[in-house]
Amino acid sequence: MRIIDKNTDFYDFLQNMYPDNSLTFDRTDSFVLTKDILCKHLIVNQPYYRRNKEKITRYNFLLLQVNHTFWLFLTTITKVTENGIPIDYDIELIAKWKNYNKSKTLCNLSIVQFNYSLNSYFNMDYFYYFNKRFDKTKLFKKSDVLIKAVDTNNYTVKQNINKHLIYYGNFDKKVEKHIPLLKASGIAGCIDALEIFLSFEEYFSSKKTSSERIEPLGITNNDKIESHGFDTKLSFRNKKM
């Protein structure tokens, strides 16, 4: 798979290791997702009246989908300002899986929230910075519960991270980009480069396959019938050899 983009990401080197010019990933709609940008999404995800050191959403779930492959991460806010604004975080991979029963997409990254019963199951309290009851060990051991919730759409998207405005000149021109590059966000350290590269490649391969015509242009219904060995004048009975 060949990648077209002035920006680079952590999996780009694989296009030279596995050259295939029959597939092209036009990634010019990309932007570099930095920690600062992701922190801004975490800020928006905080209720305003809870933005202080004692009462903010310390833990957040990130869900990444590329084609039919899913990655679920847990972000833990590790540093905040005096006003409780997140400025740093850690990321851990909870689970990675494929689901071919869900609609495919090129790339989608979101902050998601599970329902109250799941939060209670893991002793997660979304409203307090310090939560001594929360045991991350259980979260990772029981990741199948969260996978099932994603597969059945039993979650809410709180923030979509697939949109970012880039300003040019004297900030008089702006362009909206939609493909996040992960190398500067901390997410790249949790994903195998080959796995995400192959997921992108699988997406474009399936798009190419679906766009290829099996039958030539201009073929009629009678042509199709006769090409399968039937005679249109004899009620579709097999032709005589």
Image (cartoon, grey):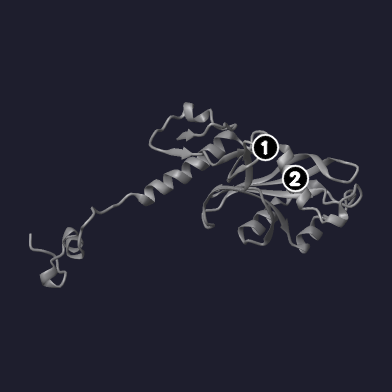
Q: Identify the image quadrant of the C terminus.
A: bottom left
Q: Is residue 57 something one can see in this rendering?
A: yes
User: At which x and y percent is residue 156?
Assistant: 69, 60
| Neighbourhood count class around disc 2 (C-alpha, 10 Å): few under 14, some 14–19, many 20 upward | few
Q: Mark 1 points at which residue?
A: 190
> Closest to the observer: 42 or 100?
42
> Closest to the observer: 165 or 1?
165
Left or right for 218, reference 3: left
Disc on res. 40: 2
Q: Is residue 127 something one can see in this rendering?
A: no
Left or right for 224, reference 241: right
Q: Which residue is at a point 41% across and 38% down the rendered structure image?
A: 23
Indicate whether 172 appears above or below 105: above
| Neighbourhood count class around disc 1 (C-alpha, 10 Å): few under 14, some 14–19, many 20 upward | few
Give me the C-alpha separation between circle 1 and circle 2. 21 Å
* Element carrying mark 1: helix
Quadrant of residue 50 within the rendered picture: bottom right
Q: Marks 2 and 1: in contact by CB < 8 Å?
A: no
> Which residue in the rendered view is the most extreme toward the left?
241
Q: Which residue is at a point 7% across and 63% down the rendered structure image?
A: 240
Judged by depth in the image, the label closer to the viewer, 1 or 2, is: 2
* Element carrying mark 2: helix
